[in-house]
Amino acid sequence: MGSCSITFLPDNKTVVVETGQTLMEAASAAGLSISSVCGGEGICGKCRVRVQAGSVASSPNLFLSAQDEEQGIVLACQSQVQGDVTVEVPPESRNGHVAKLVTEAVAHFERAQKPEEKRSGFPHDPLVRKLLLELPAPSGSDNICDQDRVLRALSRDRSLPSVHLGLNALRELPTLLRQSDWKVTAWLGYADDRLEVIGFEPGDTTWSNLAVAVDIGTTTLAAHLIDVNASETLGAVTKYNSQARYGADVISRIMYAGTKARLRELRAAVVGDINELIAALAKGAGVRPQAVGYVLCAGNTTMTHLLLGLDPSQIRRDPYVPLATHPPTIRAREIGVRIHPCGLLSVLPSVSSYVGGDVVADVLMAGMTETEEVSLLIDLGTNGELVLGNSEWLLCASASAGPAFEGGGITCGMHATEGAIEWIRLGARAELLDCGVIGGGRPLGLCGSGIIDAVGELLRAGCIDRRGRFIADACGQRLREGDSGDREFVLFPAADTAGTRDIVITEADISNLIHSKGSIYMASECLLEYVGLGFEDLSRVYIAGGFGSHLKIDKAIEIGLLPDIDRQRFQYIGNGSVQGATAALLSRPARRYLQEKIAGSMTYLELSTYHKYMNEYSSCLFLPHTDIEKFPSLAGKELKAS
Amino acid sequence: MGSCSITFLPDNKTVVVETGQTLMEAASAAGLSISSVCGGEGICGKCRVRVQAGSVASSPNLFLSAQDEEQGIVLACQSQVQGDVTVEVPPESRNGHVAKLVTEAVAHFERAQKPEEKRSGFPHDPLVRKLLLELPAPSGSDNICDQDRVLRALSRDRSLPSVHLGLNALRELPTLLRQSDWKVTAWLGYADDRLEVIGFEPGDTTWSNLAVAVDIGTTTLAAHLIDVNASETLGAVTKYNSQARYGADVISRIMYAGTKARLRELRAAVVGDINELIAALAKGAGVRPQAVGYVLCAGNTTMTHLLLGLDPSQIRRDPYVPLATHPPTIRAREIGVRIHPCGLLSVLPSVSSYVGGDVVADVLMAGMTETEEVSLLIDLGTNGELVLGNSEWLLCASASAGPAFEGGGITCGMHATEGAIEWIRLGARAELLDCGVIGGGRPLGLCGSGIIDAVGELLRAGCIDRRGRFIADACGQRLREGDSGDREFVLFPAADTAGTRDIVITEADISNLIHSKGSIYMASECLLEYVGLGFEDLSRVYIAGGFGSHLKIDKAIEIGLLPDIDRQRFQYIGNGSVQGATAALLSRPARRYLQEKIAGSMTYLELSTYHKYMNEYSSCLFLPHTDIEKFPSLAGKELKAS
């Protein structure tokens, strides 16, 4: 087999690979990241690249239009190199691997990242800390061993429990102590109830104390680099979960994980993602990944099982018993996460098989357990999670929503990162009046809030009916038949975008969103019914999710995702999962509160056996609902009949 | 390079190796163990084999006599194979690798192994234990996770602290619990203050709870397999420490360990030895090494540092500060010790650089801290250790004695195992009247007590003078000039032995012993002088060491090793190190007593800077002493003048 030289533009990186490898593999070899949700299966259409010179073997694909083909656009994962090639990676294909969360999003996280201000009860008492030790040199009259010299100094801090000094940290001591003239910094981290030495560093390095908070979503991961001393978020990145290639939802992943080898494969996939995220965060902050001492992950129960290589099979079998809801804190290297060699890793506690640490974190960030007033929290992830309650009780449920809220399964969907359309405004004859693009430049695609907003706007403008089908008269020339035969509405022609393709919404996209929103709305109704309350009894509705911070509540109500109550009662809390993990990193009392108060008081309502959920779900597959009485503020509005 | 076929007799094992490999390497490839102290350097002369057919490339060696060469005897480590060879491994070369400690020795250990009887204060409360868990199967109304189901059951035993259930044990749970119908055995071990899960086993396996106690001597290792439930010793084995190839004493090993790679080399050597000992013990008991859940090691401070890969360099540098006197308990696999994959390993605490956990264990077994009467303990190892004191105070010292007490550095020396001469009796004209051989058969060599006894007997019979030189007239025909030019006394001609060589004592052997005994005696005097006491103030003198249980106290006094006091005050306690480790395995209070009471109350007297030790040492290089007044019971006896 011969080899060929592949050059990627605009980075102008060249790599030599063997004939027959895919452009995706070549890009990976070149250290480039190309968007992909499906992990190279050719079923997400995200990895579009343009062949500028040379040729590749590539079969026709539903995701590529005739126009695309004319322009030399192919899917990188479905194209095998046959000789030297020059390939351009267009902007819309560059954001998918590790993407930096841009200003608006980070700004939001920065507001949220000081839990001691937001949640006044929680002091700064981090899971990971540094202590400067200025030790007396040993002498004839003070010749205790190095181990005891260090432990004696640490025991002087009365606020610390006794410290466990393991073999690895111990081994470095003699040389380190003597080379640094007995002035060293001890890096300590809590592994559950025990304070472990992560390592020692020469001199005073107390100024640097980094940790990473990770939200492990079924579809999307988000990671924040935390300056633990300053309680500041130094960076935030996101990427799709590489496990997606093994199945889009938790059930299909659990089924895939049926053997030890496959369980390892799934673990390796998400660990690889986390390593990429940490590497990107470290690069952004100008440090090495080894400068990170602690990783705290929040995710649903299946995600944390897969991360730790714990068999999740019982999660989907009656009586739905997970293996572990509060797995032990481990050394990150035990599962292959690359930070400091003795750095620690833990996960936020779960409640049950379908209520994970991510939701527990959401509840913390919403503050719903701090008042007697009843509120509802909705986390719009692939698995939608809902929590109802107050300081006395919490009832939760989970509803499979699909990846639409994260831009997954949507033709031009993308993360809520630079280039994502967050909202649009249509005028008469479906004219595009205005839109909001994260970062302010030309658009690349639609993030979760953009999709919700676009469908709501299409409905308001009369371009779709209550079943989500296009109304040709109203759409005018913007409506066309796509290459797949599905009707699609062109929001932006390629020329007006930062990418190479038209930004469209297809009827299938709208149908996906309707199923997602129906599932969430129905779950909300069931939770309330179970405790004998109605939407009018809610003092607040908290919306969590990483889909962009400009969700228009009106539109979300218009499509029937959120209940039709006073708009002032809604509050968007952003990615509560990663924020809650950050709060727990910065405050041990917050972590204890998460475990004891929140996780400990949650009751789970199983919707799959709840009669109302199954019986009435189909009535939610309508915009907003078959029973318009449930949406009184919309009842008077005229829409084109379906 | 060609290959050749090597057959070893009497095992009749054949192995194919490459031309140029040594017979030692070939034996190792054949799974055979040939004696070696020096690890293949050609400087111990222990690996004698007889070439029966074929030829090897072998240079002349001081250890081989002309007669040996005639018989085809070569050193296995110095002989390279050139073609097919048949080799006989004579009995004296077979005992060195892993040797079973025979009845007498084991019987002694069996008496010692029930610490709750011997040391009445210590109840049976082992470091490793098993608990049968009969769990209710999960149901809709009891669907806590597997982790909590197990922890809930464990928490019912009020005598246990909270249990740490790590990732490895957790991973096995779901399958194990369901396949064993919710009846499993939890194997738990104390890692310092924390109770760790070692593993779970299906059904009720509480009947099997094995641990291993190891004495890591500078020259010799001894290991006992302990049935923890029954407080019984199931087997005892010994072998030379393979680190000997890097230096005979702790100082030369510390010097060798100067780089990380060499430190790893030393660790690998002793870990390999421990693995061989454990494998032999397991085989003897008909179990797999994985059936062992805990290894507790006792050794001097340098040995425990090398075992754990801890830099020992400061031990020999002023102010003599070890890295760690109480290293953390670890998973045995962390350093490569092969027992249960999650089995634990710890070491008994040291006091200082030159007083290790082995001596602390000796003090426990002697019981010297349980009375106000002052006693002296002498551990006759390569590093001789001495402890003086009572229930109020303990003063200890260490004196480099060399390997003579363990049969090392002695021409026909060997372990105190089958075939070892423990004592002899000479008659008129140096005629051999009687001798005691461990196991009762023909002799193979001299163990430590045999060497002491033989030198004492030669002195009594007038065959050597007070400087340890042979007196030709008295020795008669038994005295000859050896091949190395050194004079030697033939105890047994080869024909009367179980081996292939004459059993001799050389003038160099006697000189080695005199230096060893002088070092120990001088240290005893210094310790007493330091506290203003004399030998007459001692209520007891305890002798510890693995050199055979038939040490004749009279002879040891006659050569000036032990002080000349009432013989009834001496007590031989055997290998106190391995017994103390066993006691600690079986009783947590005993382990605590070792650490808090014994190690915590010991003061170390540095002899290398103690004027008397340096000034008067040479007066001890005499049998028994230049000042015969120190040995009043011997003063009247007539000896041939030197």
Image (tube, coloured by chain):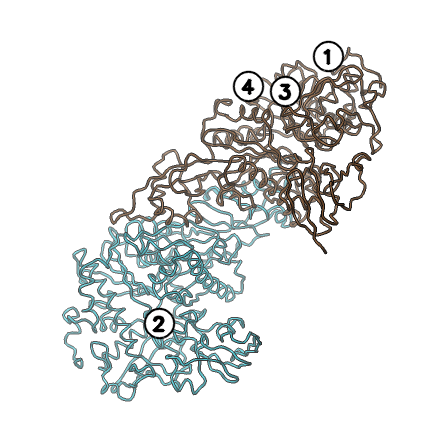
Chain colours: A brown, B cyan
Disc 2: CA contacts within 10 A as few (<14), some (14-19) or many (>=20) = many
Q: CA distance from mark 3 to mark 1?
A: 17 Å
Disc 1: CA contacts within 10 A as few (<14), some (14-19) or many (>=20) = some
Instruction: Please tell me which residue is depicted at 23% across the width and 53% down the height of the picture.
Output: B372
In the image, farthest residue toward the top: A636
Name which quarter of the figure residue A385 lies in.
Answer: top right
Chain label for disc 1: A
Disc with the residue nearer the chain's start (3 vs 1): 3
**Front of the two marks 2 and 4:** 2
Nearest the eye: B33 or A447: A447
**Front of the two marks 4 and 3:** 3
Q: CA distance from mark 2 to mark 3?
A: 83 Å
Give the percent coordinates (x, y) of residue B84.
Answer: 55, 81
Helix, strand or loop at mark 3: strand
Residue under pointer 3: A541
Q: Which amino acid type is shown beneath numbered disc 4?
A: Thr
Contact between labelled residues 4 and 1, with CB atoms less than 8 Å apart: no
Disc with the residue nearer the chain's start (4 vs 3): 4
Q: Which amino acid type is shown beneath numbered disc 3?
A: Val
Residue under pointer 2: B407
Disc 4: CA contacts within 10 A as few (<14), some (14-19) or many (>=20) = few
